[in-house]
Amino acid sequence: MNDTHMIADTTRRIFRELGDPQSLRGDADRQRLWDALETAGLTRTWIPESLNGSGATLADGFEVMRVAGEFAVNVPLAESMLGGWLLQQGSIATPVGSGSVAPVDVRDHITAGANDVLSGTARSVPFARDAAWIAVMGLHAKRAFVALVDRSLCRIREHANVAGDARDAVGLLDVPPRAIAQAAIDAHALLLIGAAVRAMQMAGALQAVLDISVAYANQRVAFEKPIGKFQAIQHSLAKLAGEAAAALAAAGSAADAIASAKEFDAGIFLEVAAAKIRVGEAAATGAAIAHQVHGAIGFSREHVLHRYTHRLWAWRDDFGGESYWAVRLGQMVAGNGADALWPMLAAR
Amino acid sequence: MTAIQIDPIRLSAEAQALRSEVRAFLQQEFEAGAFDPLQGAMQARSNPEFSRKVGARGWIGMTWPKRYGGRERSYLERYVVTEEFRVANAPVGLHFTADRQSGPMLLKYASERIKMEILPRISRGECCFCIGMSEPNSGSDLFAAKTRAVRCDGGWRVRGTKVWTTGAHHADYMIGLFRTSAPTKENRRHGLTQFLVDMTAPGIAVHPILNTLGQHEFNEVVFDDMFVPEEHALGEIDLAWKQATSELGFERSGPERFLEISYVLFELVRVLGRSPDVRGAEGIGRLVAQLHTLRRMSVSVNGMLQAGKDPMLEGSIVKDMGTVWQQQLPHKARDLAAFVDGDAHDRQRFDELLAHATAIVPKLTIQGGTSEVLRGIIARGLGLR
């Protein structure tokens, strides 16, 4: 058993015990789950040991994301991990407590002015209202910087996505950061790794949606037999399995590409853009099939299904949606010319 | 553990180096006029001289043992060769069936003498195979096959008819599925046996069946008291249903399942030009993302097979999704190119290719296992049947 398996198993065990999306209600439950994740070091997966983190590889961290996606619970694990990774790009130590990262909307920009005070607005920042700190990526005199900001200094306008999870607008009005440093990467790189993170969570969620739907079809009896015995249902679930497999292939490939890359080059861009596009498409198609197979019960508040499907829909929007990435990818492909397309694909 | 597992496997450096060799060879052949990629997309693809050259390069039967003419290379190296030939629309019709299916079948079930006789010829690109499975009343339901092989002195006598037999008019041999016993009450799959059939044997008649485009690819093959020697029975008599080889996984999940009409996408990119509008860019972006995903899924499944895993479910998914994607591709490309100037030179070539692709895509979800059969297999793998 290698390290990736161990860290994935630890993640799965904690979520099984404390993160069941069906029973997880209210802030106290979420806090218990968060504490367990923090104690296990998972929230600091991508921070080196020298900076008080777990020092796990990027590959390990992506696997944590996928497993967390199998439970689709609204704790800021991915955001804290990503925030920790971002701060490290400026060699800034990550504080304890839950964090978030900004910007996540491709249209938003944060800038640094004189005396390094920060300004700008970042929309749809996940769990901003709950975060102790926010890792911010921005531009100062055309150079990328990373900054650590106290959430208490930000102006928060509360919003929620379709799953009801916090996606707050974070206003920075001349906010002095707790730390700021030139970054080894730029906003494009944050967008890429953020999109890969969401793609992995979505792939995990789709795997779970498939398993839940198959189990339901085997158990639910109608017309005197389990509905999974009907060919119409079998073929729907076979298509759902295809969508889950596509999501897993695309997201897993993008994560693997980032984990083994030296820089965020055109190949990484292809991998991540393709993953966010294809996983987003799989989320729409897959969720529709899962709901159809479940019938009315899957549309009830009480049933667990919507905790997955709503997050699948919502996660499509973070770090660029399908259309955003498709236009950019299409522009790159067209710009390189028709004859460059196959060599680019074949190199992956 | 969830139902679906896909390890993100990459092609080795050796495999990618081989790709450069294959491309150089194809470029050289193209320049020598051996084939035309765009015409190749639309025409029958058998070219004996070309197949012999490919064989001389060691790219047919390349995973087989050396003593049978193979090169003992990996399945992922074969994967690279397959995708480069497919993307170039190279004329592989003569050797591809033998390379993919028939050779591996012989390797596993034929006598040593037959293996020594036939496999090296396949690997040299000198030997063409066809597959005799479907019959007039037995398509997806293979176990309904009625063509009978009856024991006689020294072998078998065969009577019956196979249909939709691709390439039977070029083939030197067929791997045929014949009924040697009646099915049993307990097992309707019982009673079928696979045979190696010499297509020059007396008692075989091959009649062309034209496809919807008027092309001659498949045939009706009639056996009228044809003799098959004892040694040509492959594997155990009556038990063909047990003989699904591991190659089935490679066959289902190979790159031909999503690259058969890849030229549609490449030519779409060409006609939309270097700076398409947002609609064109988004359309290209989505198609490229979908193709990349199919390919990564396919490479990963092939890599898992190579590593000795059994991604049965995932392999069937590659074929189902790959062929459905290809089936939609000409229609999406047509939409995306709708506003491109109709008089432009590239546009005319694109339209020609598009018309051809539009007409041939219905076969993709039928040949080699219909989508419906595949989804049944996937459902079984999920634990629903």
Image: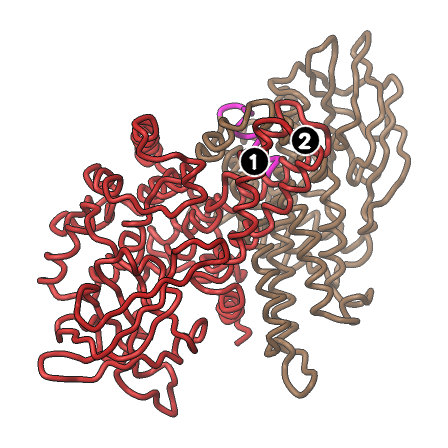
The span picked out in magenta is: A262-275
Query: Residue A269 lies in magenta, yes or no?
Result: yes
Q: Is residue A303 left or right of residue B163?
A: right
Query: Residue B73 lies in magenta, yes or no?
Result: no
- Image vertical order of residue B187 relative to residue B76, above or below: below
- Image vertical order of residue A111 relative to residue B339, above or below: above
Q: Residue at coordinates 80% horizontally, 67% vertically from top-left?
A: A302
The image's mark for residue B350 is: 1
Crowdedness of circle 1 by 10 Å Cα count: few (<14), some, many (20+)? many
The image's mark for residue A32 is: none
Q: Is residue B125 left or right of residue B362?
A: left
Q: Which residue is mark 2?
A: B340
**Chain B takes which shade in the image?**
red
**Chain A takes which shade in the image?**
brown
- In front: A143, or A51? A143
Q: Residue at coordinates 60% horizontally, 31% vertically from top-left?
A: B347
